[in-house]
Every structure is written in C-alpha cells, then in structure tokens.
Amino acid sequence: MDIRKQIGLNIQRIRREKGWSQEQLAFEAGLHRTYVSGVERGVRNPTVLIVQQLADALAVPPDRLLRAKISANE
Amino acid sequence: MDIRKQIGLNIQRIRREKGWSQEQLAFEAGLHRTYVSGVERGVRNPTVLIVQQLADALAVPPDRLLRAKISANE
DNA sequence: TTGTGACTTTGAGTCCGTC
DNA sequence: GGACGGACTCAAAGTCACA
C-alpha cells in the first residue's frame, strides 16, 4: 500500500468525521485548497512538516495519519 | 517537539539497535549516506515516500518513525 | 564513521482557472 | 463541495569534497 494513499484516506476520513470541507481543513492547516485535495487523493507527496500541520489541524497525533490498521477502540 | 527531530531520533535509535552504520542504512534504503545523516539530525524535511523507504529498510511500520511516545513493551 | 556547506535537478506547494 | 490542469516559485532530493 502506497503511504500516500494511506495518508489520503486517513485525512479524508477524519476530516469527514469533523464535518469539514477540504477548504475548511486547508484553512485550519494553513495550506492551499487544491493541495489538500491532491493529498487526499494520494497524488501528492507531502513532507513530514505538512503531515504535522494537517495532524495539528485535525487534532490527532501525526503518526495517526500514516497508520495502516486502525483498531476500533481508539 | 519538531517532528523532524522526532523522526531523526527514532531512526537513529532503531538503526543503532540493528548495529548498522548510517552508510549501511543508506544503502538498504537506496539513499545517500549524507542525506540519511541530515534526516537523523533533523535538518532535512523528508517527504512521506522517503519515510516509507527508511521504514522499509529498518523493517518497521512507517508510522513508527513519527511516534513520540514509545512504550517499552513493543 | 559521521557532520557540514555548497551545489544542481526535481518536485513540493501556491494560485489561477474549468468542469 | 470536490476533481483536475497549467504555470509558477522555492524548497526537497540527491550528490560531492572535506573536516
């Protein structure tokens, strides 16, 4: 599994759980709307600093966005 | 805590546990020796694809390298 | 064995837009 | 609201000589 796809899926899921649009997330993370779109689709290759910005905006630890398996009880 | 520092510390610790030199890790990950050096010191801002390459070389899940708190029993 | 400054090439990240 | 494209800027990728 490509880590970029994994990150995209995780971000999209958490974002939707919050009921945010991509634009809202982009604003909170201080990033561009189109860039967040690309990251969610797995076509972008973000740096770890960007991962941290997105994690901060979503209020989750950064490693959470790279996680492949998410157990149900967390 | 800067996520770059965190990644550097994690990589260095796991690498040393394996008794590898930076050069050995660089070879396994398909990267340059001096680049790995920079990542370990937290002066580089690697992309997630680089993180995955290093994680693969170290035989750990990618999110493991971003983890701040490492419990003793894992 | 590792750190570091300097360097060129590539791609990360922004901004405009359309569908 | 979101996918996608083109053009742009600057930082990351990747390498080297030397301490």
Image: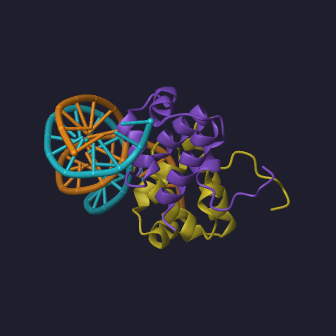
Chain colours: A yellow, B purple, C cyan, D orange
Q: Quadrant of residue A4?
A: top right
Q: Is residue A2 visible?
A: yes
On screen, residue A45 versus residue A67, left or right, reads: left
Total number of numbered discs in the rendering = 0
Q: Is residue A46 visible?
A: no
Q: Nearer the viewer, residue C5 or B57?
A: C5
Residue at the image point whose x is 42% and y is 32% from the top: B31
Q: Nearer the viewer, residue A13 or A69?
A: A69
Work out whether A14 lies above or below D14. below
Residue B64 position in % (x across, y down): 65, 49
Work out whether B19 lies above or below B71. above
Q: Quadrant of the C terminus of chain A?
A: bottom right
Residue B11 position in % (x across, y down): 55, 46
On screen, residue B38 versus residue A18, left or right, reads: left
Residue at the image point whose x is 66% and y is 70% from the top: A18
On screen, residue D2 versus residue A68, left or right, reads: left
Work out whether B41 lies above or below B53. below
Q: Nearer the viewer, residue B1 or B41?
A: B41
Q: Quadrant of the N terminus of chain A?
A: top right
Residue C11 position in % (x across, y down): 36, 40
Q: Residue furthest right?
A: A73
Residue at the image point whose x is 59% and y is 49% from the top: B65
Residue A51 position in % (x across, y down): 51, 57
